[in-house]
Amino acid sequence: MVAGDRPAVGAGPARLARTIAVASGKGGVGKSTVALGIAMAAAERGVRTVLVDADLGMANLDIMAGVRSAHSAADWLGGRVTLAECFVAVAPRMWLLGGASGLARMADLSPAQRQRLVEGLSRVASHVDLMVLDLGAGIGAGTLELAGAADRVLMVTTPEPTALTDAYGFMKACVRGGRRAGWNVACSMATDAADGARAVERLRRAVARHLEVDMHDAGSVPDDSSVRRAVRAGRPLLAAEPASPAARAIRRIEGSLAGLPEPSARPDLFSALAARLGVRVAGAMAAAMGGAAITGASMPR
C-alpha cells in the first residue's frame, strides 16, 4: 500500500470491529472464496474491512486476491516488521493481512508471539468496521480458539455428506469449548437453490437435535465455473466476474450476515482470545481503546 493508505492512528476512543470467523470442517469446500467474497462485498457497501488469513499452515488468500505483500504475519509475529507493513490493499476500503505460512499450530507460538497476536488484532479492529477471519480447515487448536472467540461464525459446507459430517464435527468441537451462539451456515457448490437449502437444513436439524444449537441460514452459492476461472486467474471473484451467479450469491450472504442484530451479549474477540491463549488482556485493550499507533507505522483507514 502507498503511504496515503495507512494514515497515522489518532488518539481517542475506539469501537472494536465486528468479527466474523469463516470456517469449514474440511478443505476444498470453497471457504476461502466465500471469506474473500463477503469481505469484498462489505467493502463495496462502504464498510472498512480487514480480511485476515488465519490459516497458520497453508495461507493462500494473497494468491486468490491477486496481491502480494513484502511481509507476512509470520514476520510480524517474529518481531521483524511492524504490523502495518504486513497489510496490502485489495480494493477500496478493504485490506488483507496475509497468513503466517510455516507456523503449524497456534500452540507453536511463544508467549510473546501470543501477546503480540492479541494486541495487534485488537489495534486493527479499533480502526476498521469489520474483520473477517478466514480460518484453517478442520479442528486444529488455533482454529477452534479463533472460532470460539469471534462475534459470529460462518460455517461453509457443500451438499456432500462428507462435508456436512465434517461441518457437524467442527461445530461439536466448538460447542464443547463453549461456543453456543452466533452460528451461521452457507452452502457452497450447490446444484441450485433447492439443493443448497436441503443441505443447510440437514445440518441445522442435526445441530439442533444433538448439540441444541440454533443456526442462521445465510444462503448458498451455486456450483459456478466463474469461481474456478477467478481462482485460476488469481483474481477475487467479485472483481473478476461481478455479475456471475456465484458473485451475486456471495453478496446476498454478506447482506444476510450484515442484517443480523448484534448479539445481546456480544463476545469480545480479543478478551476471549487472550484468555484462551493465556496472555494478559489489559495491554491489548489499552492499545486498542487508546488509539495508540503501531510502532513505526500506521493503520489502514
Image (cartoon, rainbow, N blue to C red):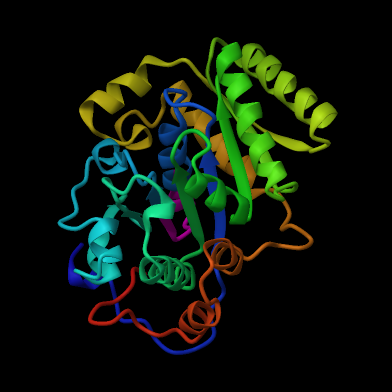
Q: Position of residue 155 (x, y in %)?
A: 59, 35
Q: Quadrant of residue 78?
A: bottom left
Vertical comparison of 285 with 35: above or below: below
Q: Is residue 48 magenta?
A: yes
Vertical comparison of 242 with 164: above or below: below
**What residue is at 71 percent from the left and 43 percent from the top?**
176
Residue closest to the eye, 147 or 87:
147
Q: Position of residue 215 (x, y in %)?
A: 74, 36
The quadrant of the picture occupied by the C terminus is: bottom left
Q: Is residue 274 magenta?
A: no
Which residue is the extreme one toward the left?
A: 70
Magenta residues, start to end: 41-50
62 to the left or right of 153: left
Vertical comparison of 267 with 201: above or below: below
**What residue is at 55 percent from the left and 62 percent from the top?**
273
The quadrant of the picture occupied by the N terminus is: bottom left
Residue closest to the eye, 74 or 86:
74
Residue 228 showing in the rendered view = yes
Q: Position of residue 106 (x, y in %)?
A: 42, 52
Q: How many marks?
A: 0
**What residue is at 48 percent from the left and 49 percent from the top?**
142
Q: Position of residue 53 (x, y in %)?
A: 37, 48
**What residue is at 38 percent from the left and 35 percent from the top?**
238
